[in-house]
Image (tube, coloured by chain):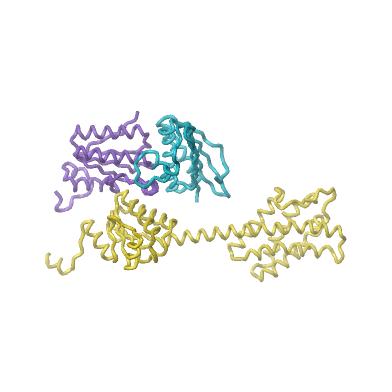
Amino acid sequence: MTQGVEANSVVLLLRERRDDVVAAWAELVAARMQRRASEAEVRTEVGNLYDALVAALGDGRVLDSTAPGLDEVRAQLAELSRTRARVGYTPSETAVSVFALKEAVLAQLGEHPSPEAYADFIEVSRLIDDLGLVTFETYVSTREEVIANQTDELLELSTPVVKLWDGILAVPLVGTLDSARTQVVMERLLQTLLDTESDRAIIDITGVPAVDTQVAQHLLKTIVAARLMGADCIISGIRPQIAQTVVGLGIEFGDIVTKAKLSDALEIALSEVGLEVVPKRAAAAEA
Amino acid sequence: MERVPILKLGDVLLVSIQIDLEDEVALNLQADLAERIVDTGARGVLVDISGLEIVDSFIGRVFADIAATSKVLDAEAVVVGMRPAVAMTLVDLGLSLGGVRTALNVEKGLKILREDLGLRGVAELDMTPDRPGDT
Amino acid sequence: MPGVEATEPLELPIAADRDVVKVRQAMRSFCLVAKLTLVDQTKAITAASELARNALIHGGGGQARLALVEDRGRLGVQAVFADEGPGIPDVDQALDDGWSSGSGLGLGLSGSRRLVDAFEIETEVGRGTTVTITKWAR
């Protein structure tokens, strides 16, 4: 940070030649954006940034990029980066847009700038570099947000709880069962048991690729929670290999009923709520 | 000192916990219930915890003790209405409630008591319409 | 433990039964402000209840200090339970208590740890025990 008495000549130049520099900058950015935004849009965007920067460097001193005086500039950059990230621009594209200002400014210094002018330019250039990096950080956090939201949605979609019959729910699990997923499944199952006043849930694990000790524990936690509330669960979809793995690992399901076929589990659940399935002809004959 | 009210519905004593219980109040409830079971000859105890947002290890043990005491006095206890968040918390806490019988709501709890114990006086108090074949 | 206090902490004495209820109520308020989900809120309040009761029954009384904390933009609730009681001779054992242990101290301690995101315990025989828990919003 300069402590010199004199103002940075390049900063003063930025103020004087605003329109020229903004036009040059906008042109450079638009060229790189490969027609994904109109020149008018770009000019407005960079124009606002430019004005904020010049306003912040008001007295001619080049500030450190983290200085509070540059709050507005950083905020605008963050917003720019965010919107670009959401639409799918790469972080380089956004950062390069910022760096392009250096080119635009350099062009204003003429063919043979004095050593002092050069020194001032380098100072300003450093600040622009740092500001370009700000856009990187915002990009990363924005993308992480997008991914997190998508993950949540996927989690919701992949854990349906369906009502098979009065008092009987089914939870077809598909995919790996980790602790995050288990939490979601548990919450939805338990709430649905309560809302639908169902006593029984069939947890089908046909779509779960592997059952290890961890997965078994997650299943058990879910069933224990349901039992605490007064409902019971049957596990179905136990493939022969899974059965062998489970035994090999020494996992015991205790008194929890486990079945290979969903249909068998349904039959048991129906019987437990006092129903049985009979062929139509037999029922008609009895009538 | 607050005391949780105990209602008598036929052969069943009904307790509905709506408030955040102080430990002592919970212990008093346990004692009061034991006395009322003996006084009334009740054969069933229904504890409705649908209003409880928090069940920690102390309260959990009180419920387990209520069930055990009732059993000794020849009555059956059922705890109903546990909230999903409470169930999930108890699982992490590692509390099993010592095999206390539970049901989703008061209606189902009464049904259990009626079916398991053939209690009289309960039929006229539950809300489900009688099905043919019911006594 | 990460987290910067974002508000003035609330100090509550734990000297009697009803203080445990007060801790639960205060914990609930903090959880609401931190926008914890219902399940997380329930877990946090339950853990606080366990630890407050431990301080009362095993620690002979003590105090709770609740605060809203912040870490890189997300909010959380932090609670410290301190007593000057007998301390815990074998912390590892106390924390290792199995799932079905019914005896007082162990279950509350090990159980609470499973309910929260961060758990720290300092204890010295004859000096007392301090437990700090943190639950973050997601």
Please state which of residues A199 and C134 is positioned toward the viewer in this rendering: C134
Please state which of residues A224 and A201 is positioned toward the viewer in this rendering: A224
**Could you tell me which residue is drawn at 37 percent across and 56 percent down?**
A217
Q: Is residue A89 above or below residue C26?
A: below
Answer with left or right where residue C6 lies relative to residue A170.
right
Answer with left or right where residue C129 lies relative to residue A274.
right
**Could you tell me which residue is drawn at 69 percent across and 54 percent down?**
A73
Answer with left or right where residue A197 lies relative to residue C2.
left
Q: Write down which chain is painted yellow.
A: A
Q: In this view, does A248 lie above or below B44?
A: below
Percent of width and height locating residue C10: 52, 35
**Could you tell me which residue is drawn at 19 percent across and 43 percent down?**
B122
Colour assignment, chain B: purple
Answer with left or right where residue C125 lies relative to residue A41.
left
Please state which of residues C57 and A165 is positioned toward the viewer in this rendering: C57
- Quarter of the image where one finds residue A235: bottom left
- Quarter of the image where one finds residue A143: bottom right
- Quarter of the image where one finds residue B1: top left
Colour assignment, chain C: cyan
